[in-house]
Amino acid sequence: MRVIVREFIEADREALRKLFVASRDAAFSWAAVGTHKLEDFDASTAGERILVAEHSCHPIGFASVWQDDSFLHNLFVHPRHQGLGVGRMLLAGCDRYFLSVPTLKCLKANERAKRFYQSQGWRIRSEADGPEGSYVLMERVSPGDSFKPKLLRGSA
């Protein structure tokens, strides 16, 4: 399958709105049917850099980054195209927007997403509760950093 990762254009908006709802409905099985709305895409990506994964001229996934904070805010792949490497391609495309160690939040209940990010070199930095439930804050591990213990301030 040939996939292109490119910058968002306004003509993508309607297809990405639908993809956003379908992906969230599939991933967030604990949420009530009808919880996710098309306009949620607009609110969730406002002011962010958006990359689109496209196959045969149709968006099949997207990622959005809050560039100032090197924060990966959204990464969704349509359920029919999951497990084919599209998420990895979107993550790789986001690298140019990360100005420091990138972070993301992942709901604890979303085990599949946590496993995916961990398989891509991300680790859990902390845990907290938010409006949608308990989540983990993850950061990407630098190559060669995965086995280095973090020193606490004042440690030698």
Image (spheres, rainbow, N blue to C red):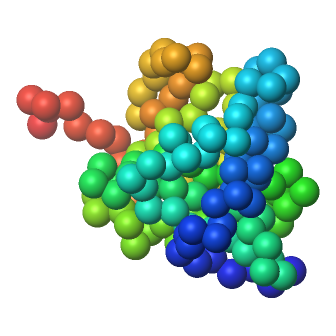
Left or right: residue 69 versus residue 86 is left
| Residue at the spot 45% in from the left edge and 33% down from the top edge | 137
Viewer-closest of 156 and 129: 129
| Residue at the spot 73% in from the left edge and 74% down from the top edge | 54
Image location of residue 31, percent across then percent down: 76, 21
Left or right: residue 71 versus residue 3 is left
Residue 102 visible in the snapshot: no
| Residue at the spot 34% in from the left edge and 57% down from the top edge | 67
Viewer-closest of 116 and 106: 106
Q: Is residue 31 above or below residue 72?
A: above
The N terminus, quarter of image: bottom right
Image location of residue 80, percent across then percent down: 90, 57
Quarter of the view holding residue 114: top right
Left or right: residue 24 versus residue 88 is right
Image location of residue 33, percent across then percent down: 84, 23
Quarter of the view holding residue 106: top right
Quarter of the view holding residue 36: top right
